[in-house]
Image (spheres, grey):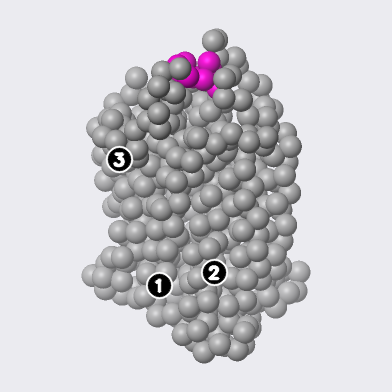
Amino acid sequence: MQKAKLTFWQMWNISFGFFGVQIAYSLQNANISRIFATLGADPHDLSFFWILPPLMGLLVQPLVGKYSDRTWTRLGRRIPYLFLGSIIAILVMCMLPNAGNFGLAVSGAMVFGLISLMLLDTSINVAMQPFKMLVGDMVNEEQKGQAYSIQSFLCNAGSLVGYVFPFIFAWLGIANTAPEGQVPDTVKYAFYIGSAILILCVLFTTFKVKEMPPKEYAEFHGIDLEKKAAEGKGPGMFELLKKAPSTFWTVGLVQFFCWAAFLYMWTYTNGAIADTVWGTTDVASEGYQAAGNWVGILFAVQAIGSVLWALMIPKFRNIKTAYVVSLLIGAVGFASVFFIHDQYLLFISFLLIGVAWAAMLAVPFTLLTNSLSGDHIGTYLGLFNGTICLPQIAAAACGGFVLKLVGGAQVSMFLVAGVLLVLGAVAVRFVKTR
């Protein structure tokens, strides 16, 4: 069967729900350290709270891939999973920022926050992974680069909205400070509004996208249904890992360095700029909470840089060259944060960091899906998520130790992140493309 080309808007509709999912994800990334620091967490322990999100992704996404490969309902193969994940995410987004409002002791509020964070990241992962699979399912090899670029654009646009919400609410006069141990209303309202947008975006994709029925899907991907039926259930996940193309492993090596770097950015930006720009480490102070809002602005600037650079990536003749250049520019951005103590000059740093982020969102999945057949593509994409989750788990587990090693100043972790991106750029040379 000839693989038909999709229109721009068909590819847009496939990924549009990702906009809402990414709002939820960006709210989590920008505010988790702020929430737990406000609840009373020690800075040297902050990275441990970041183990849960990638750990849940590591457990959940391969299962979503595996079982959605075998699913077919009236709604399709992938859409039931993204719909279920979104509903759970909405409920948890309304609970997490209220961890300090139930009269619990510090330890109790921490436990409640941790459970909420675990449920939130699990549900976001269940909702997020199907969008990557839909592109693999429905887009031909020639258009996958463009389709993942559209997804990257929507991802960064969603990030932009989620990141600026607390700042906008503070500007509107909503309280940006709260009693000790409680999260400010600016953060709470951001989570509430984000959850409403999430469900609207997912409903849009649910009604606009019609997945291929099994027979058409098999023809599109060249799958022999009779042979597949004769083989029964087929290989398990460990067997598929053994048969994974070399691209899976070599791109995974690059991913290890990149995602470890960004984990440190998400963990330590709030404390770093509160110290270097506002001159405070007191989490109850107005300066620390103002820095928390400014983190959202900086991450939004990063998203803008990512959107702009995503337009440049297709102009490179060689996708590996685009990958290397992007990561090296991002490394410069990370390192520069250490030397810049002006809140506005930090825009330059985060624009450069956005360049690396654009490549991380689009290039790995383009390289991987072009090396896979349609059979088991969901399982492989779920397993590939391990190259995102494992480096974050490793980085989070070592975060406190690394922070002590570099002197205890949270801004020093940006130098560490810069070095990690340089190592990622070096690792690109091992990736083989077809």
Q: Secondary structure at mark 3?
A: helix
Circle 2 residue: 116
Q: Secondary structure at mark 1?
A: helix
What amino acid type should be assigned to the residue bearing mark 3?
A: Phe
Q: In the image, what residue occupies the spot 31% across and 49% down?
A: 257
Q: For mark 1, does the 10 Å Cα neighbourhood hold few (<14), some (14 to 19), or many (20 or more) residues?
A: many
Residue 197 seen in render: yes
Q: Position of residue 374 (x, y in %)?
A: 46, 25
Helix, strand or loop: magenta stretch: helix
* Region of the chain picked out in magenta, as a range: 217-225
> Which of the numbered marks, if any, corresponds to residue 238?
3
Q: In the image, what residue occupies the spot 28% across and 52% down?
A: 419
What amino acid type should be assigned to the residue bearing mark 2?
A: Ser
Residue 363 seen in render: no
Circle 1 residue: 46
Residue in the foreground of this view, choosing between 6 and 286? 6
Q: In the image, what residue occupies the spot 39% across and 76% down?
A: 43
Instruction: Answer with mark 1 or mark 3, whichever residue precedes in sequence.
Output: 1
Q: CA distance from mark 1 to mark 3?
A: 33 Å
**Image quadrant occupied by the N terminus:** top right
Q: Position of residue 107 (x, y in %)?
A: 46, 85
